């Protein structure tokens, strides 16, 4: 009788491979957790040089207090007050009350009495118990800056896998100067960026899993909430439409009637809710008409919100020069080789093309929606450079990412801690880095 004995070698190899995979998984989770903890700490720790109350912060605070007074279900009254006030020729230009979601989140935080908790940060001690409304808005902004970082970690892992590329993206986002700045103030831009990137992520998932009801629903809901957050949702929606067309070339996934239905139903629901909150179609249109009209004549907007099409590039070059240079240098390769990065690059390009043509409406705060795409492109280029080091590629990758993160943190300290910037206009940025020597 012939007996065939199985060699133990394959089992040993298989077991070793399993152990290596398990060790790699554990190592990935530990490093990711440490990077996320660092990013969260920098958003929570009070490091802003400007500790007063900014113009935008004061207006959002006023809206929250109005909701406190009249109630959430009487929001159309607040919108009517805005219209009555803005129709006066001498009235100061104000942010529209249609940025409902941010105000509502701040109001709910305050109602839950989180805003009355003991002061835990420098900014809290400045206006502390005297102004729980402003503290509530600040903490909402900080929370969504942290959620934005968490979204980066989850989406980055799904895009690139559990590897050095996704860890590098988490690291670069943890130290992103604009993201830390958004967590330090009661500003809406980081809050809006979260909903914008959630809409982009769910769109990407819907392309890859065209019949998944969960992702389709999440995409429609995220667009609706993005519309309730800020009127800049229009730019993001246009870019999503451009990606629908670009998918014929990118082949990220399949565009189905269900996806198109979600992309129509989500905005329809968002606009319907917004119109209802405004008090009807007439009041909603009037709010945006007055916003555009006033902005065109606002002295500050004319002085600081204008410029050539490359204005955003100039401002980003001041704040994050290494990241921007790496991202731009990666474009030729990713458009040919890496579909996921090309997807992000096309989104950025389309939204940029629309946003840079808004008259008197350019501000680097609006560029927070490009933080993930730019850092994903930068990480791609860092990976390409590290390959030049052969067997020492991993070491080179770690060193390069650490250098970029250290420089990003240095930029935050220079711009926002030492110089104390609040508004992100070109003149202030140039002063902060000593290109201009004018007084503050």
Image (spheres, helix red, strand yellow):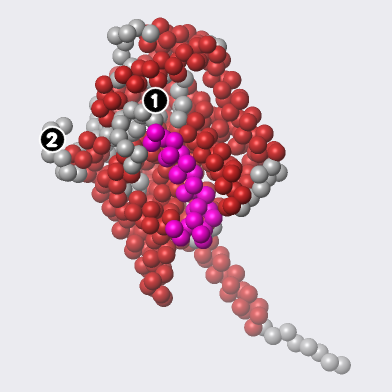
Residue 133 visible in this rendered orientation of the protein: no
Marks 2/1: CA distance?
35 Å
Question: In terms of depth relative to the viewer, which is nearer, 111 or 99?
Answer: 99
Which mark is drawn over residue 136? 1
Hey, which quadrant is residue 406 in on the image? Answer: bottom left
Residues drawn in magenta:
332-357
In the visual, does 89 lie left or right of 37? Answer: left
Q: Determine the residue positioned at 66% across, 80% down.
A: 10
Q: Is residue 20 above or below residue 113?
A: below
Instruction: Give yes or no for residue 400 being in the magenta stretch.
Output: no
Q: Is residue 188 above or below residue 92?
A: below
Circle 2 Cα neighbour tier, 10 Å, few/some/many (<14 / 14–19 / ≥20): few
Most common secondary structure along the magenta stretch: helix
Q: Position of residue 240 (x, y in %)?
A: 54, 39
Which mark is drawn over residue 51? none
Camera-near label (2 vs 1) is 2
Q: Position of residue 288 (x, y in %)?
A: 45, 18
Hey, which quadrant is residue 265 in on the image? Answer: top right
SS label for mark 1: helix
Position of the C terminus by quadrant: top left
Q: Determine the residue positioned at 56% across, 34% down.
A: 222
SS label for mark 2: loop
Residue that badge 2 annotates = 438
In the visual, does 294 lie left or right of 248? Answer: left
Q: Position of residue 338 (x, y in %)?
A: 52, 58
In the visual, does 413 lie left or right of 15? Answer: left
Q: Position of residue 243 (x, y in %)?
A: 55, 44
């Amino acid at each position: 009788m012939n007996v065939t004995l199985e060699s133990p070698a394959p089992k040993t190899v298989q077991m070793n491979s399993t152990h290596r995979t398990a060790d790699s998984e554990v190592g990935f989770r530990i490093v990711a957790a440490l990077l996320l903890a660092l990013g969260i700490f920098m958003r929570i720790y009070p490091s802003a040089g400007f500790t007063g109350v900014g113009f935008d912060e004061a207006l959002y605070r006023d809206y929250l207090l109005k909701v406190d007074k009249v109630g959430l279900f009487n929001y159309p009254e607040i919108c009517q007050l805005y219209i009555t006030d803005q129709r006066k020729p001498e009235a100061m230009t104000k942010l529209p009350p249609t940025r409902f979601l941010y105000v509502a989140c701040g109001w709910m935080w305050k109602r839950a009495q989180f805003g009355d908790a003991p002061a835990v940060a420098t900014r809290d001690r400045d206006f502390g118990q005297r102004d729980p409304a402003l503290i509530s808005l600040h903490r909402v902004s900080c929370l969504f800056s942290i959620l934005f970082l968490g979204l980066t970690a989850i989406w980055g892992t799904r895009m690139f896998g559990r590897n050095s590329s996704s860890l590098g993206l988490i690291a670069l986002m943890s130290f992103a100067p604009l993201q830390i700045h958004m967590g330090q103030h009661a500003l809406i831009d980081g809050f809006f960026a979260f909903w914008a990137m959630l809409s982009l992520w769910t769109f990407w998932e819907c392309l890859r899993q065209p019949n998944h009801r969960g992702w389709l629903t999440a995409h429609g809901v995220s667009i609706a909430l993005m519309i309730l957050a800020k009127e800049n949702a229009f730019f993001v929606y246009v870019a999503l439409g451009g990606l629908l067309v670009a998918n014929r070339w990118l082949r990220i996934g399949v565009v189905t009637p269900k996806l198109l239905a979600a992309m129509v139903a989500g905005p329809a629901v968002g606009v319907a809710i917004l119109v209802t909150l405004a008090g009807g179609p007439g009041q909603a249109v009037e709010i945006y008409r007055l916003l555009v009209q006033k902005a065109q004549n606002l002295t500050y907007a004319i002085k600081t919100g204008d410029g050539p099409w490359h204005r955003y590039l100039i401002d980003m070059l001041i704040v994050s020069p290494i990241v921007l240079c790496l991202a731009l240098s990666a474009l030729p390769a990713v458009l040919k080789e890496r579909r996921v990065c090309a997807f992000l690059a096309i989104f950025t390009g389309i939204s940029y093309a629309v946003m840079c043509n808004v008259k008197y409406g350019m501000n680097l705060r609006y560029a927070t929606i490009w933080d993930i795409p730019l850092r994903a492109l930068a990480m791609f280029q860092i990976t390409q450079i590290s390959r030049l080091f052969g067997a020492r590629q991993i070491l080179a990758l770690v060193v390069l990412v650490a250098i970029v993160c250290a420089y990003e943190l240095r930029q935050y300290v220079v711009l926002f801690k030492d110089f104390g910037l609040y508004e992100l206009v070109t003149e202030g940025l140039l002063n902060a880095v000593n290109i201009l020597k004018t007084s503050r």
